[in-house]
């Protein structure tokens, strides 16, 4: 057996894990990346945040509830995302192509894997005070592919809890049919809609420690609260799709190239 095949088998998902992903829409892998690698990414991200190295997305540009009213307002230069992470530094590039990630995705997609550079592809930050909450939404709401089956790989560079705006999921919600009237103009689940109350009740906080990784389906409803701690929460997010699932021509999803990966 070749060394490449041996490595692939070592990173393989079990039948139970694949079944769990199909059922719940997400999987958590504990301590997938070591402390030294995480600390290096944190240091790189901190320097780029301090230098406001573009491309950036600011909280003020999102317009979520509680965000600064403009870039010129108090807290207006609070960064939400360091965009284009794949090309920012070798540490992010190498993580995006990590064999442990790609081999698992290969099993879940059951075909060769592509990294999309059009979506996510970022270092996510949640700042104290000006970092806004995110309502229940699906990532596929603004992605355009022939099939709504992509997977986000989310790496926690530090601890993530409800106190600092950690992720929450509604298990199995990637399989739900949602009527248009249940969603607002931004395709978030409406808090006031009666049919959504039972869905919200199923929400589950997923606490992560440094180096933990979550794979979650692009149709899975997820949310995150505000950061009530004094420290910035930092994560890395990349999105992937199967090779046969291509971006719709002329869409935002097709505006940036894909990277075809091998495990």
Image (spheres, grey):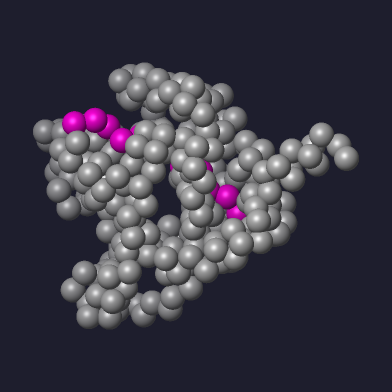
- The magenta stretch spans residue 216: no
Q: Where is residue 158 in the image (x, y as percent from the top left)?
A: 37, 33
Work out whether residue 172 or residue 223 is closer to the camera in this orientation and state it. 172
For the point 71% across and 42% down, the residue is 10
Residue 157: image location, x then y, percent: 41, 33
Q: Which of 154 and 149 is in front in this view?
A: 154
75 lies above or below 111: above
Seen in the picture, residue 16 relative to 129 is either above or below; the reply is below
Taking the spot 52% from the left edge, 33% from the top edge, the residue there is 33
Residue ranking furthest to the left: 74
Q: Is residue 213 left or right of residue 184?
A: right
Position of 248 with respect to 55 (left or right) is right
Residue 47 appears in the rendering:
yes
Q: Which residue is drawn at 49% across and 22% down?
A: 36
- Image quarter (top left, top right, bottom left or bottom right) of the N terminus: top right
Q: Residue 58, can we see it?
A: no
State whether the magenta stretch is mostly helix, strand or loop.
strand
User: 124 left or right of 100?
Assistant: left
Q: Magenta segment, which residues?
A: 230-241
Q: In this view, does 172 lie to the left or right of 116?
A: left
Whether 62 is drawn above or below 76: the answer is below
At x 64%, y 49%, the residue is: 104
């Amino acid at each position: 057996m070749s060394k490449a095949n041996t490595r692939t088998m070592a990173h393989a998902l079990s039948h139970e894990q694949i079944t769990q992903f199909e059922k719940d829409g997400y999987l958590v892998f504990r301590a997938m990346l070591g402390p030294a690698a995480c600390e290096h990414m944190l240091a790189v991200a901190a320097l780029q945040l301090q230098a406001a190295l573009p491309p950036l997305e600011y909280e003020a540009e999102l317009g979520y509830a509680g965000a600064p009213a403009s870039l010129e307002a108090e807290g207006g230069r609070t960064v939400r995302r360091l965009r284009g992470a794949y090309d920012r530094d070798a540490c992010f590039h190498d993580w995006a192509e990590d064999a442990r990630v790609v081999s698992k995705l290969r099993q879940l997609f059951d075909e060769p894997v592509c990294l999309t550079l059009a979506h996510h592809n970022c270092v996510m930050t949640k700042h104290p005070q000006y970092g806004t909450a995110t309502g229940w939404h699906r990532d596929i709401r603004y992605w355009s592919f022939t099939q709504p089956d992509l997977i986000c790989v989310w790496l926690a560079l530090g601890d993530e809890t409800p106190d600092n705006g950690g992720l929450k999921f509604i298990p199995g919600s990637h399989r739900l049919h949602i009527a248009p009237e249940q969603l607002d103009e931004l395709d978030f689940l409406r808090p006031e809609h009666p049919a959504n109350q039972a869905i919200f009740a199923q929400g589950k906080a997923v606490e992560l420690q440094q180096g933990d990784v979550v794979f979650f389906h692009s149709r899975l409803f997820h949310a995150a609260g505000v950061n009530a701690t004094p420290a910035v929460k930092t994560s890395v997010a990349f999105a992937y799709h199967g090779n046969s699932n291509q971006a719709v021509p002329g869409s935002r999803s097709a505006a940036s190239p894909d990277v075809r990966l091998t495990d």
